[in-house]
Amino acid sequence: KAGVTQTPRYLIKTRGQQVTLSCSPISGHRSVSWYQQTPGQGLQFLFEYFSETQRNKGNFPGRFSGRQFSNSRSEMNVSTLELGDSALYLCASSLMRQGAMAEAFFGQGTRLTVV
Amino acid sequence: AQKVTQAQTEISVVEKEDVTLDCVYETRDTTYYLFWYKQPPSGELVFLIRRNSFDEQNEISGRYSWNFQKSTSSFNFTITASQVVDSAVYFCALSEASTGANNLFFGTGTRLTVIP
């Protein structure tokens, strides 16, 4: 069974540009969450999508947005990039089960560097 | 407010030693979930275990064991007979039913180095 796939693995962008990151969840998983990992702030929740709807959102500015497609693949977009957006962006997928929390499986991440 | 504290920033042990990674959590929810993840240098977070707040049974999986104690709000992780392949950053995480079960709050991680 294929794991969570994130593309691209590495990205270098210039301040002010925008970027789109992609995440393909494990087959059958309908929930996709995004996290930002930085040395200073650690791992922080960005948002969660389920059945193409944003179900939960972390404390990030509106420059960070996402969407989910009917095949559960998800993209996140960051507009007007700032130097502080340099981070490892991790995507996690999980299988929603009735009445139970399913564990989240993570991809290898996209390392974004803003210069 | 929810919080996960991993007081040990870095730990070094010699191969075959046992090591315990500490995790203390705070939550007001009665229904919550606790996790441990391993992050090797490749960056991917590898799932190790999930525990829900109603299940305080300790668990053992091979060389790994977990001690969940609600009375002290702790969820500690022990590696027995450590190996070099155990070197990684380990994260403890919490999710709450009220804020979204898939919204994980992570601790700051403990970097474990196993010296051959």
Image (cartoon, coloured by chain):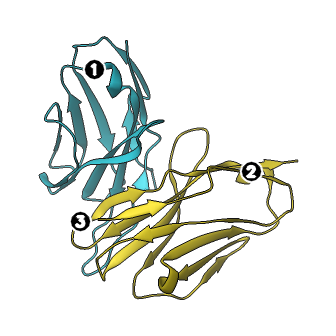
Chain colours: A cyan, B yellow
Q: Which residue is mark 1?
A: A82
Can marks 3 and 1 be said to lie on one chain? no
Task: Give the mark toward the camera: 3 or 1.
Answer: 1
- In this rendering, the answer to whether A43 lies above or below B62 is above
Cα separation between marks 1 and 2: 36 Å
Name the kind of residue labelled 2 in the image.
Val
Cα separation between marks 3 and 1: 29 Å
Name the kind of residue labelled 1 in the image.
Glu
The image quarter containing residue A90 is: top left
Task: Give the mark toward the camera: 3 or 2.
Answer: 3
The image shows residue B87 at horizontal and vertical percentages of 71, 49
Task: Give the mark toward the camera: 1 or 2.
Answer: 1
Q: Which mark is residue B100?
A: 3
Q: Which numbered disc, 3 or 2, marks the residue that appears first in the sequence?
A: 2
- The answer for which chain carries disc 2 is B
Residue ID at (58%, 58%): B7
Residue ID at (19%, 19%): A80
- In this rendering, the answer to whether A61 lies above or below B5 is above
Which quadrant does the C terminus of chain A fall into?
top left
Q: Which residue is mark 2?
A: B85
Cα separation between marks 3 and 2: 33 Å
The image shows residue A86 at horizontal and vertical percentages of 38, 25
Q: Secondary structure at mark 2?
A: helix
User: Mark 3 touching mark 1, by CB under 8 A?
Assistant: no
Residue ID at (13%, 52%): A54
The image shows residue A72 at horizontal and vertical percentages of 22, 50
- The answer for which chain carries disc 1 is A
- The answer for which chain carries disc 3 is B
The image shows residue A40 at horizontal and vertical percentages of 44, 36
